[in-house]
Amino acid sequence: MRATIIHAPGDIRVEDRPEPKITAPTDAVIRTVATCVCGSDLWNYRGINPVTKPEPIGHEYVGIVEEVGDDVTHVKPGQFVIGSFIASDNTCPNCRAGYQTNCLHRDFPNGCQAEYIRIPLADGTLVATPDQPSEDLIPSLLTLSDVMGTGWYAARAAEVKPGATAVVVGDGAVGLSGVIAAKELGAERIIAMSRHESRQKLALEFGATDIVAERGEDGVARVKELTNGVGADSVLECVGTPQSMHQALQSTRPGGNVGFVGVPHDVQIDGQELFFSHVGLRGGPAPVRAYLPDLINRVFEGRIDPGKVFDLTLPLDEVAEGYKAMDERRAIKALLRP
Ligand SMILES: [Zn+2]
């Protein structure tokens, strides 16, 4: 089969690899219908995460079940399925508490930018759609595997409530998905922080009511201006840099909450400052598995269309161009068709 391998920073190739096989009775093998490049894949592509040997890459996927192990009962061959980027049994105490990404038995599907993928803990990880989806739903369903579920978690962690004012820091695919989530959870005012015209447009289309292009202290001042001087009820931090975290914490009102889903890189938080701010803080890898049934319904009902974050679609063989386009910020997110 054809599969994407990262050899070194900036060096992405498609190569022939053996097709994955069932290795545990809880595995499933799926034939990939669509996959994509994640902002977090760029950490490897840019050499910020070390790449020491050639490795399969990719963790977002939708596909058709080809084969299941003997213990798998919740999905069967022929079904269209979506799964989380972290495999979970969905039965342990952490899963039952809604934190499937901290499953006691978690596993990491990797190498998903390929024609076939082996998914561990298939019963807990995969959710089948009610019917075979039409072609136009596939991009939106694919986002549920990571970015839309992550934006949803950011909004939940920031405790977005009906009537709330929400700020979204970050205008990548997760931030834009966060705008959708804030709207669905009833936020009345949604301030999207973005300097890029095409992303501002998409944010407005997804439900943002205000755009703030300023950064740093100017960005904080602008949010304060828009919120009667107090800051927002809920802030979704979707970047993971010291600047974006500072922006998020400073933009939140006392008693408000920050949901942070950008993987922190060199982020330090001042304990005293946090203490006196009365700001609540919760983050982490999003338990997207918890949201799959609900988000699948919202996509099938046409309530949300997060697939619009894909502004580049390529055949799998041209995956290297997908990475390049995202790295150079020519594309928000690249969808790949094997
Ligand atoms: Zn678990």
Image: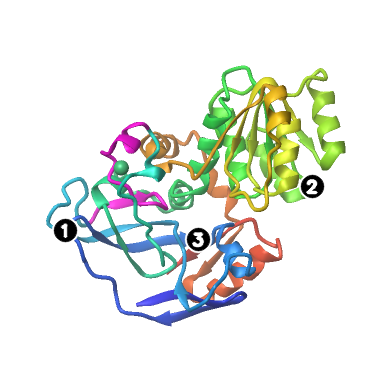
Asked whether mark 2 lies closer than 8 Å to ligand 1, one says no
Q: Percent from the top left, x then y, of residue 171?
A: 68, 46
Q: Is residue 311 magenta?
A: no
Residues tagged 3 and 2 counted as in contact (Cβ below 8 A): no
Whether residue 126 appears in this view of the structure is no
Q: Residue at x 65, y 47 (%)?
A: 239
Q: Mark 2: give few (<14), some (14-19) or many (20+) Cα within 10 Å.
A: some
What residue would you read off at disc 3? 36
What residue would you read off at disc 2? 195
Q: Percent from the top left, x then y, of residue 175?
A: 63, 43
Q: Is residue 47 left or right of residue 4?
A: right
Q: Earlier in the sequence, mark 2 or mark 1?
A: 1
What residue would you read off at disc 1? 25
Position of 19 relative to 218 (above/below)? below
Q: Quadrant of residue 165?
A: top right
Q: Earlier in the sequence, mark 3 or mark 2?
A: 3
Amino acid at circle 1: Pro
Of 93 and 233, nearer the camera is 93
- Secondary-structure class at tag 3: strand
Q: Is residue 95 magenta?
A: yes
- Secondary-structure class at tag 1: loop
Q: Nearer the viewer, mark 1 or mark 3?
A: 1
Q: Is residue 128 left or right of residue 317?
A: left
Q: Which residues are magenta?
A: 78-97
Q: Quadrant of the N terminus?
A: bottom left
Between the residue at mark 2 and the residue at mark 1, the CA separation in whole angstroms equals 49 Å
Q: Nearer the viewer, mark 2 or mark 1?
A: 1
Between the residue at mark 3 and the residue at mark 2, the CA separation in whole angstroms equals 24 Å
